[in-house]
Image (cartoon, helix red, strand yellow):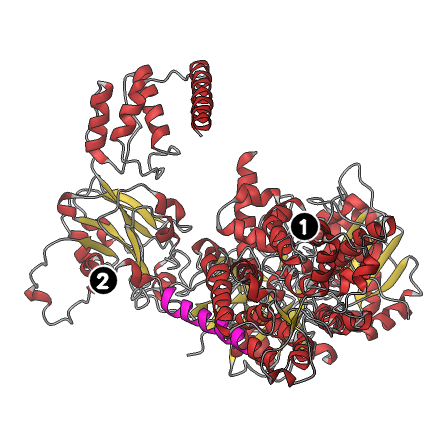
Amino acid sequence: MKSLKTFARGGVHPDENKFSANAAIEALPLPKQLVIPLGQNLGAPPKALVKKGDIVKVGQLIAKGEAFISANLHSPASGKIAKIDDALDASGYRRQAIFIDVDDDIWEEHIDRSEDINRTISLSKEEIVARVKECGVVGLGGATFPTHVKLMIPGGKTAEYLVVNGVECEPYLTSDHRLMLEKGEEVLIGIKILMKALGVEKAIVGIENNKTDAIQHLKKLAENYNGIEIQALYVKYPQGGEKQLIKAVLNREVPSGKLPIEVGCVVSNVGTAFAVYEAVQKNKPLIDRVVTVTGKAVKKPSNFLVRIGTPVSDLLKAAEGLPENTGKIINGGPMMGKSVSSPDIPVVKGSSGILLLPREESKRPQPKPCIRCSKCTVVCPMGLEPYLLAKMSKLELYEKAEKDSIMDCMECGSCQFTCPSNLPLLDYLRLGKQRVGHLIRTRK
Amino acid sequence: MNDILLFTLLTLGLLGTVMAVILYFVAQKFKVIEDPKIDLVEDVLPKANCGGCGFPGCRNFAEVSVKAANETQSLEGLNCPVGGNAVMKAMAAILGLEVEEKEPMIAVIRCNGSKANSPAKVQYDGPASCAFAHNLFSGEGGCQFGCLGLGDCVASCDFDAIHMNPETGLPVVNDKCVACGACVKACPRGIIELRNKGKKDRRIFVSCINKEKGGPAKKNCSVACIGCSKCFQVCPYEAITMENNLAYIDFEKCKLCRKCVEVCPTDAIHELNFPLRKPKPEVADAPPKERPAKVVAEAAAPKADETSNETKPDNIA
Amino acid sequence: MNMFTISGSPHVHGDESVKKIMYTVVYAMVPAILVSIYFFGLDAARVLLISVMACLFFEWAIQKYLIKGPVTINDGSAIVAGILLAFNIPANIPSWIIIIGALVTIGVAKMSFGGLGKNPFNPALVGRVFMLISFPVQMTSWPVPKALFSSQVTDAITGPTALGILKEGVGAGKTIEQIMTDPNMPAYIDRLTGNMTGSLGEMSALALILGGIFMVIRKVIDWQVPVSIIATVFAIAGIFHLIDPTHYIDPTFHLFTGGLMLGAIYMATDMVSSPMNMSGKVFYGVGIGLITIIIRLWGAYPEGISFAILIMNAFTPLINSAFKPKRFGTVAK
C-alpha cells in the first residue's frame, strides 16, 4: 500500500478514543428555554433585533451582524423572548444573551424542511455569498469565522483549491465523521456550492484514515461530482489545523503570519459545507449543529443534532447522565477544547463536542524540571521551540519571544501533550502570545 | 636576578604610564558634560528603581526632574511615591524650588471574595499566574471581577509589602507599601487601587468591584456590592458615586464618618484601623453581624514564608 | 461536592515522563553492564553498586539537608549518573575514590547548578575528569579482563589500554606495524566484543551499540549525535590513515577502542547538556568528533572523548541560539 499523505513536521498521536463513531446522529427534543449568546462568532457580536415579549418563529432573524466580520443569529425555536440578559459562557464570564421560552416548533414558511436532496445549484456566485451571509453560517470546525467573509477573496488573490477539512484529528470527537456518513451527498453539494462561490475547479476533502467508512462512502458519491477529490490521510494530530491540512494534501506551505489564500487555497470544514448546503438549497439558517457527547465513563456516547442554545446539561441527560466520577467537562476536544465550570452553558455554533473526563484524568501531573529533552521542539508542527518561548513568556521577555515567532503558535498543545516533565508549556505560550499581540497592537 | 627584577619593574612601569596617558586623553575626548545637580538629586532618591514615578529608574527620574526644574521652574507631575514628601522636599531644596505636600497613598485590595465569602465552585489547575487564569475562566468562586488569588501582585512588589493570606486566599497589603503602583498594573482585573492613606491610617472603601446586578453578584460572593445605593443615600458628603451597580467612595471627599459602613447590607464597605464601636442596644435582638474580615484583615498579615506553600510550584524558570 | 477542574488545553497527556526516560536509559545500559561483569567479575559489580548507591545517597542527602526541598531520587536520574560514572572508571579502583567521584558528580556537577535539568555539563563526565586529574595512577591502571568471577583472586593483573599502547608507540616513533605486534594489543575481534583492558563500560562496542539502537527506537536519544561523532572520527582518522598508513592507524581501530562508543551513545546524548535542535545536534556531534580525534592523534592524553564532550557542552547554549529549527511557512536560510 502506498504510504498516506500527511504534513511533514512534528505532530503527535494521542489515543483516539472515538467511542461515538458508530452512534447515528440523533435529533434532540427542544428544551423549555434556549439561551442564545450574542457573541458566537469570531469578530464583532451581532446586535439583537428582538426585545422582551416578542414572539419569534424558528429561523427568524433575532440578531444582525453589522460589522464586516460578524454573523447573523436566528431563532432556533418558536416562542417568546423571555429576556435579554447576561448568561454564563464557556469561560464562566457573563455575556449578553437572548433567552427564548420555547412553546412550539413553528418554522418560517420560506424554509424547505423536506428531506429530499436538492442537487441543482441555481443561485449565482453573488447570490450564494449573500445567502450564506443572510443565514449566519460560520466555520463549524471551532474557529467560528463567518463563512461569507471567507468566500470574499481579497483583491489580487485567486483561489485555486478548496480544501475541505474532514480530518477531525481531535481524539474522541465524531460529529464530522457521522455527518460525512449520514449526510455525505449534502456535504458534497455544499462543497460544490462553495466551489462555485469561490470560482475554483478543484476541491480536495482530507479525511484521516481512521474513518475508512466515511472515505469509502464519500469516494463513491464523489464519482458523480466533478472536481471533488477525496484524500485519505495518515492519522496524526494536528492535521486539522488549516496550515497543516494544506501541507498534507497539497504540500504547500502557507507563509508565516499569512492566510491560506496566499497559496491559492481556501479551507472549510465539512460541517460548514453542510450548513452552506442547507442555507443555499433549503433556505435554512444555521440554527442547529451536530454535537458529540462522549467520554470514557459516558453510558451512551452519542452524536446529537442540537438546536443552538440548548443547555449542555440536556445533552448530558440524553447521553444517560453525567457519570459519577466526572472531573472535567470540556467544550470541544481534549487537545484544544475548553474546560467549563458547569454544564449549564448553552450549545453555541462553535461547539463540536462535549467531552467528560474522569476525575483521575482531569488533574495534571505534578510538573518537574525541564530536562531539555527537546521533544517539544520535535513535535511542534510550526517549527517553534516551545520550551524556550514558555520560558521567555514567564520571564516577560516578550520582544525576544516575538523574534522567535511566538505568534506562529497555533495552540495545538502538542508540546504540552508530549512533555515528559508535565510542564504547562502551552499555558505560558498562550500568555506570551496574548502579551506579544498586545505589544504589536500598541506599536501601530 | 636583579636584572630581571629591574627589567620587570621598568617594563611594567612604562606600560602603566603609557596606559595612563592614553586613558587621560580618552577620558578628555569622551567626557560627558552633565548637570552636577543630577547626581545630587539622585543621591536623595530612594534608589529602589521601582518605576513608581513612571520613569525607568531613579537616575532617569533625576535627569527628568533636573531638566524640568531648569526649563519650567516647577516639579509638577513629578513625584517619587516611594520617598514621599521628605524626598520631594529634599529634591526641591537642591533645585531651589518648592513642592506641594502630597498625602501619602497606599495600595488597597478591593475584593473580599475570600474562600469563605466566595466558596470555590471549580478547581483551577494550572500555572500560578493571574494573567493566564484571567483569560481562562472567571475564577474559582465564579466571580468574574474578583481576585483570582494567584499572586501576580505579590510577584510584582519590590517592597515586600503585599502577601497572600493562605486562609482567605486574598492578598494583604502591609505598611511597607510605598504606593509605587506596580501591583495596580500587575492585577489583570484592576482590583487594586492606590488610595489615600488617611489620618491615623484610617480608611473606608468599597471592597468590591463587581459591576453585575445584585442577584448574580450575591450568588457568587456573600460580601459583593449589590448596587443597592444605601450608602449613596446616607453619605452626607457626596463622596459616594453609583455606576454599573457598583458604589465607589471618593477618598478625597470622604470624611471617614462611617455612616456608609453601617448601612451596607452585604458588608462590602470596609473600615480599617478604626476603634471598635459600641454595640448598639436597638439591634440587640437581631443576630450580631459578623464582620471579621474587615478590621482583622490588615492585622493578620501573614509572613512571607507562610505564603509559599499556597501557590503551586511550576518549574519553567 | 462534585467540583470540576478548570485548566488550559490540552486536557490529555502522552505517556512520556522523566522517570520513563531515565529507566529506558538504564535498561539500555544492561547489555554493557552484563559484559563488564562477565569480564571483570565481582569487581565490576562492586564498582557499579558503590557508584550508584553513592550517587543516590548524595542526591538524597543534598536534597533533604542542604536544599531542604522535595527528594526526587526515584526519578532515575541519579541511577543513570551512577552507572555512567562506573562505566568510566577501571574495575580495580578503590571504593573510596568512587565515593569521592560520586560526590563530585552529584554535588558539584549536578546539585550546585540546581539539580536535574540545570547542569551545563554531563555530571558523570565531570566526576570522571575530576577523578582522572586527582587520582591519575588509580584511574589509569586498568585490570586485564578475565573470565567471569575469576578476579576474586587477589590483585588482578593490570595493563595498558589499546589507545595507551598506540599513544606510547607513536610517541616512541614506532610504526603502526610495530605497535600492533605489542603483546598487550588486543586482537580485532576482542576490540569488538570488549575482551581488552579498559574502563568498565567502554569494553564492548557491540553491547553499547545494541543499547543505543534501543534508545533510538524508544526515542530517548536522537541518532544524529552518535552518528555524527562516529562519522567525524572515522572520516578524519581515515583521511590520515590514507595519507600515511605507517603512522596513522586504520580508522576502525579508533571506533572500537577507548570510550568513543560509550561517549558518543550515552554521554554526548545526555538530554540536559546537549543542544535542542536537530541541526545543532549534528554540529555538536561533529565538534565532539573533531576534538576527540585531535586529542587522540596529537594530544597528550591517549583518550579525548570526555574532554571533547565537556568542551562541546560548554558551547551548547551558543549552539541553541545559533541553530534554530526551520519555522513552518518560512524559506530555509
Query: Mark 1, chain letter?
Result: C
Residue B97 belongs to the span the image colors magenta: no
The image shows residue C124 at horizontal and vertical percentages of: 56, 64
Question: For numbered disc 1, what is the local secondary structure?
Answer: loop
Tell me where residue A347 sits by quadrant: bottom right
Q: Quadrant of residue A192?
A: bottom right
- Which mark is on residue B293? 2
Residue A310, quarter of picture: bottom right
Locate residue C144 relative to residue A122 in the image: left or right.
left
Q: Is residue A114 placed above or below B12 in the rendered structure? A: below
Q: Which mark is residue C299?
A: 1
Q: Left or right: B96 with respect to A123?
A: left
Residue C68 in the image: state x and y as whole percent. Answer: 37, 67
Q: Is residue A258 left or right of residue C188?
A: left
Farthest front residue in view: B1
Look at the image and tell me in which quarter the N terminus of chain C lies.
Answer: bottom left
**Residue C331: percent from the left, percent from the top?**
76, 43
Kind of residue at disc 1: Gly
- Foreground pick, C153 / C18: C153
At horizontal 45% and vertical 17% (from top left) the residue drawn is B30
Q: Is residue A131 visible?
A: yes
| Amino acid type at mark 2 | Ala
Question: Nearest the camera: C137 or C259?
Answer: C137
* Stretch in magenta: C49-66
Q: Which x, y percent locates residue A368?
A: 51, 66
**C57 is higher (above) or lower (below) than A127:** below
Query: Which residue occupies 57% across, 45% down?
Result: A401
Foreground: disc 2 or disc 1: 1
